[in-house]
Amino acid sequence: MREDNQMLVMTHLSQLLDLVTGIGGFIVPLILWLTQKDKVAGMDMHGKMILNFQISIFIYSILSIPLIILFGIGILMLIIIGLIALILPIMNAIKVSNGEMPYYPLTIEFLK
């Protein structure tokens, strides 16, 4: 296995494709994880972390839709989810480039 922090940083930043394409922020990290997990040191852990975060963000977004109709608080939740989906990948890409461990709070662990 090779050390490749740039690949790990790009995997974290590829989540931002959600803002452009809608689903690219899930598909690109998934492809990078599946193709590089046996070649790049740490890719398996980072890939699982990213995919768990993306699935969690999707679930939280779906759960906030009924809250828009019922209480109106769902709009606030969607804004917060959007900010989290924008800020955390950038922060964690910076952490990875500095050799630190990334952290995605409120992530449901689907892939272990």
Image (cartoon, rainbow, N blue to C red):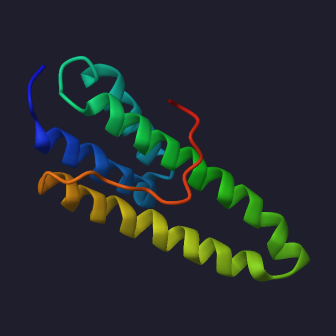
Q: Give the percent coordinates (x, y) of residue 8.
A: 21, 42
Q: Quadrant of the N terminus?
A: top left
Q: Which residue appears at 50% of the width and 30% of the height?
A: 112
The image quadrant of residue 74 is bottom right
Q: Is residue 45 left or right of residue 95?
A: right
Q: Which residue appears at 70% of the width and 78% of the height?
A: 75
Q: Give the percent coordinates (x, y) of residue 96.
A: 20, 52
The image quadrant of residue 35 is top left
Could you say which is closer to the camera, residue 101 or residue 8?
Answer: 101
- From the viewer's perspective, is residue 20 above or below residue 86? above
Could you say which is closer to the camera, residue 68 or residue 95?
Answer: 95
- From the viewer's perspective, is residue 92 above or below residue 30? below
* Number of numbered tags placed on the structure image: 0
Q: Give the percent coordinates (x, y) of residue 103.
A: 38, 55
Q: Which residue appears at 58% of the width and 35% of the height?
A: 110
- From the viewer's perspective, is residue 67 above or below residue 41? below
Q: Give the percent coordinates (x, y) of residue 79.
A: 58, 77
Could you say which is closer to the camera, residue 59 or residue 96?
Answer: 96
Q: Is residue 112 left or right of residue 94?
A: right
Q: Which residue appears at 36% of the width and 57% of the height?
A: 16
The image quadrant of residue 80 is bottom right
Q: Is residue 17 left or right of residue 110?
A: left
Q: Is residue 35 left or right of residue 51?
A: left
